Structures are given as C-alpha cells and as structure tokens.
Image (cartoon, rainbow, N blue to C red):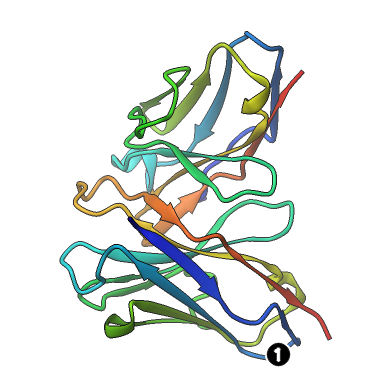
C-alpha cells in the first residue's frame, strides 16, 4: 500500500499533550522522503504546520513539533488550546505513485 | 506576496469534462524550481493529490486518475489549467491549487501556498 495511515481521531483536554501518528511504507517515508503536516481549521484551507519532519514555518507556535523514524512520523502538540481543534494531515512523496500522498487525516478534539 | 486562486464551474453534469484554472501571482512558472499542483478534498474527507506541472513543463499525475487528467500551463498569463474528463458524483470536491515549495531538496516535497479552493459539485 502506498498511502499514509493516520488515526481517525484523537482528543485531549486543554493544557494536555497529544500525538498524532503517520505510518507509511518503504516507498514513501521509509524511502527517505520527508514528512510534512498541515492543519485545517473548520471551513478553511489547509495550512502548512510542520515541514521537513520537524521544522516550523514562521508564525507556528513551538507547541507543535514533529519527528520521523523509519517508516513513520509523529506530530506532537503540547499545551493544548481550544484553537487547536482541527483536522491534521501528514503528507510525503511516494516513489511507486510518483506523486505526493496524504494521510487520511486526524480530527483533534479539544475537550 | 504569493497568491493562488482557482476558478471554474461550481456545477457540472455527470460525464462532462471539468476545466479549472489556477491564476497565481508572486512567482513565475518559468523560473527554475517552480511547480504547481492540484489537490482535491471531497466534503468531509481527506486531501487527495491530483497532478503537478513543473517550470520545465514536466507533468505528473495521480496514477488512479491518470487517464482522465490533463494539466497544462500558460506562463505568460501565470495560469495552470486542470481538466478532468468523464465527471462522476464521486468527483464532487473542493479543488485546490498549491505551489510546491521551491529550492528544497529532492527529498522534501511539500506545499507552501494554497489557493482558497473551488467547490465543484457533480450532479444532473
């Protein structure tokens, strides 16, 4: 399979820490391609949150962090805030598809 | 300042061909390293990459839709056009154009600027 797998949903209380996993394969993450994360608030355009596994674009709070290992990656959010309630997508490149691939998305609910 | 904006019909009938235009500013698709992509998102569902066109006119397509997709560019007008033939209700989605971040390594392929999206509904 050439896609990326994410849990459909995660939740946490304000102030807590949550992680979202992104599992790939040897044709994408495991092949050495970087993983990137996007945040999509309800009714809005996806916004780049993390690029190149662990880098934050200007303006993204350091509460958001990313990591990559072997064929998977993770997004961690610390100090959860109500405004973090959104969908999160991981993305990489797949050599067998010769194109970009997205995860199925994870809905984060801040309780 | 980089901006992208999608335009096209909001409603198409089954079997028709969809033509969407992405008009961008703040960069030139004739510049080395520039690439523009199309990505779609059915209502309530995940993002799906569709196609990409590069500064040198190289083109890449989602393998599952390759026979139905065509991407092209008009560098003088700063536009990228996507056509999707034989539209079906399952093609109902918001269609985004997005710039691939330039000047990154060949292992780093991501989208730094997105258009606002164009909702296309397929219905008779």
Q: Is residue A65 visible?
A: yes
Q: Quadrant of residue B119?
A: bottom right
Percent across and percent down for residue A107 are 68, 34
Residue drawn at point x = 52 percent, y = 43 percent: A4
Chain bearing tag 1 is: B
Q: Residues within 10 Å of mark 1 (few under 14, many from 20)?
A: some
Residue A25 in the image, given as x and y percentages of width and height: 43, 41
Q: Indicate whether B28 appears above or below A16.
A: below
Q: Residue under circle 1?
A: B15
What residue is at 33 percent from the left and 29 percent from the top? Answer: A55
Among the 4 quarters of the image, the one containing residue A108: top right
Q: Is residue B52 left or right of residue A104?
A: left
Above or below, comparing residue A53 to residue B122 in the picture: above
Give whichever of B60, A46 is nearer the camera.
A46
Q: Nearer the viewer, residue B33 or B15?
A: B33
- The correct choice, above or below, for A62 with respect to B62 in the image is above
Identity of the residue drawn at 74% across and 52% down: B44
């Amino acid at each position: 399979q050439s896609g990326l797998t994410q849990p459909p949903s995660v939740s946490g209380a304000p102030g807590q820490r949550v992680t979202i996993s992104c599992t790939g394969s040897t044709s994408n993450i495991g092949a050495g391609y970087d993983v990137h994360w996007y945040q999509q608030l309800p009714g809005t355009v996806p916004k780049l949150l993390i690029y190149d596994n662990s880098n934050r674009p200007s303006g993204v709070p350091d509460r958001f962090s990313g990591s990559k290992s072997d064929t998977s990656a993770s997004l961690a959010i610390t100090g959860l805030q109500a405004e973090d309630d959104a969908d999160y997508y991981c993305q990489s490149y797949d050599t067998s598809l010769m194109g970009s691939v997205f995860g199925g998305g994870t809905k984060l609910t801040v309780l | 300042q980089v901006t992208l904006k999608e335009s096209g019909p909001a409603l198409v009938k089954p079997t028709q061909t969809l033509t969407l235009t992405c008009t961008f500013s703040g960069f030139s698709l004739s510049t080395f390293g520039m690439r523009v992509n199309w990505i779609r998102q059915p209502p309530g569902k995940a993002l799906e990459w569709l196609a990409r066109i590069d500064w040198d006119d190289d083109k890449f397509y989602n393998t599952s839709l390759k026979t139905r997709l065509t991407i092209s560019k008009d560098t003088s007008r700063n536009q990228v056009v996507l056509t999707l033939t034989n539209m079906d209700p399952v093609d109902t989605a918001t269609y985004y154009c997005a710039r691939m971040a330039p000047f990154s390594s060949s292992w780093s392929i991501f989208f730094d600027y997105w258009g606002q999206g164009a909702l296309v509904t397929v219905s008779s």
